[in-house]
Amino acid sequence: MVKRKCEQCGQEFPMNETIRVGSHVVCDACCRQILAGPNAQELKLEREADPTICVNCGSDSGSVELPKLAGLPVCNPCETFFRNRPFPTWIKVSFAAVIALVVVSLVWNLRFFQAYAGSKAAFAAMARGNIETASQQMSTAASHVPECADLSVMATYLEGVTLLRQDRSAEGLVKLTACRNKLPPQFGVEALIAEAKCSAAFDAKDYDGFLAAAQTVEQQLPNDCMGKATVASAWACKYAQTGDTLARQNALSCLERARAMASATPEFKEYENRILHRLQSREIITQAEFARRFPNGWSPEQEK
Amino acid sequence: MFFIPGQLIAIATFPGVIVHEAAHMFFCRLRHVAVLDVCFFRFGNPVGYVVHEHADRFSTTFLICLGPFLVNSLLCMLICFPAFMPLRVFGVMHPLSYVLLWLGVSIGMNAFPSIGDAHGLWIQAKKEASSFNLLAIISFPLVLVIYAANILRFFWLDYLYGVAIGLGLPALIF
């Protein structure tokens, strides 16, 4: 320990208990007296630091000066402590708690991530035209988050479309009707409902109902050849059922208008042949039956 | 725009202050810089601080100054991420999501280095730039950005940053 003599009272004090006031070194008591006097505010005060005593733990190294850290004497153990100062336990516990909270919430919310991934995959499958896969994936996604109404509407919509494609129109109609006014117009729910009504009426052999529904489809899709072809199909059914030549004439007229609008897609060609077959044979068969009977296609010339 | 004293904001977002100071301390430890005193949070100005020795290498000063920005930003994203999906994508509200969002945005809000950090970086960058230290030269515009960000705190830039990092980034991804 280094000792200093107070220049005011002449007594010796440990260096750490002395204060440099300007160019003079004084003890605490004398410093207080100086500060009580005039011009005290202009004085520059600096506590003396004993280079042999650690500022942190106060250990005395005798006459050996300690290494300095940030200008202050610090013993080796304290220097090691400052350089590797540990985080307080509460910080470590808090950090662990935050990480645990994040992990728990990730696990807790896993179903949302699964639903998101499922709905993304469903939309991708839908874009590829794979409606059945899309429907399955969307239904699974909706089951993960049952509280999300949008997802369940989308799942119901895709189930409806799938049922429609599977010729289960009556069931499809129920599903699609449940989606009414709940999806944006681009999903074409109204057109699909009209299409489902057509198919359901056709399946029920209600050809008046089929014609009415087909005319609704035509109104909704005025620029679509398939809409006009559906009306032609309905008139052909009426002809096949009643033998009414006016119905036949109407069917051919509608088909002619549809043909004028149609691009030569295989889908339209198959439908056109089915209608012509119906008009020629007065036999009403389903698309599946038509495909089974005429696996290589059918044309009016072939029949003759 | 309405004014709320910084102290109140600091209290409301105290986890961010703690993380900010802990990040300063973490980088000090990483570079074996002596930490003389540390306060993770207090009701005062500044609300938290780390007193460390002067670092000899500029890269160390740079890391200690800007490290909390990275740590706070990353933690903000990490914490907000699980809450984002149910709330924003599916509209499902759960108290846990709100807790996470508060925690995440609080941490994100305190990502910006303080004026004190910028000042320390500026002083050392000036010395180092004379010896063509690239990092020091890069630091000048960064320091200006930090100063500007601290001024714009008055206009809630720190809050906007926290929201952008915590909610904006996941919105761009999903």
Image (cartoon, coloured by chain):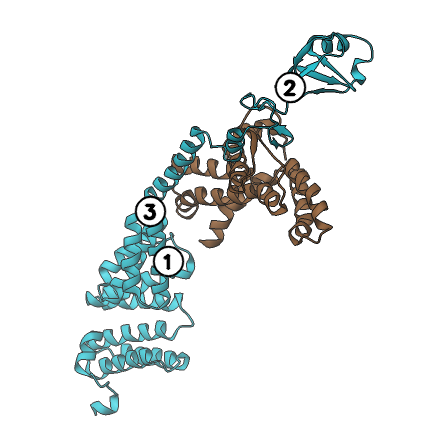
Chain colours: A cyan, B brown
Q: Residue at x 43, y 38 (%)?
A: B100
Furthest-front residue in this view? A63
Separation of marks 2 and 3 at Cα, in angstroms = 67 Å
Task: Tell me the residue that label 3 is attached to.
Answer: A110
> Element type at marker 3?
helix
The quarter in which the N terminus of chain B is drawn is: top right
Comparing labels 2 and 1, the label whose residue is closer to the camera = 2
| Residue type marked 2 | Val
Parent chain of label 1: A
Which residue matches tag 2?
A: A2
Question: Relative to A108, is B14 on the left or the right?
Answer: right
| Secondary element type, mark 2 | loop
Write the residue at 81% across / 18% down: A42
Mark 2 or mark 3: whose residue is earlier in sequence: 2
Residue to which mark 1 is pinned: A120
Give the chain of mark 2.
A
> Residue B18 at what x, y percent from top left?
51, 32
User: Which amino acid lies under the numbered mark 1 shown in the image of this protein?
Assistant: Lys
Q: Earlier in the sequence, mark 2 or mark 1?
A: 2
Tag 3: amino acid = Leu
Q: Are marks 3 and 1 on the same chain?
A: yes
Q: Are marks 2 and 1 in contact (CB under 8 Å)?
A: no
**Which chain letter matches label 3?**
A
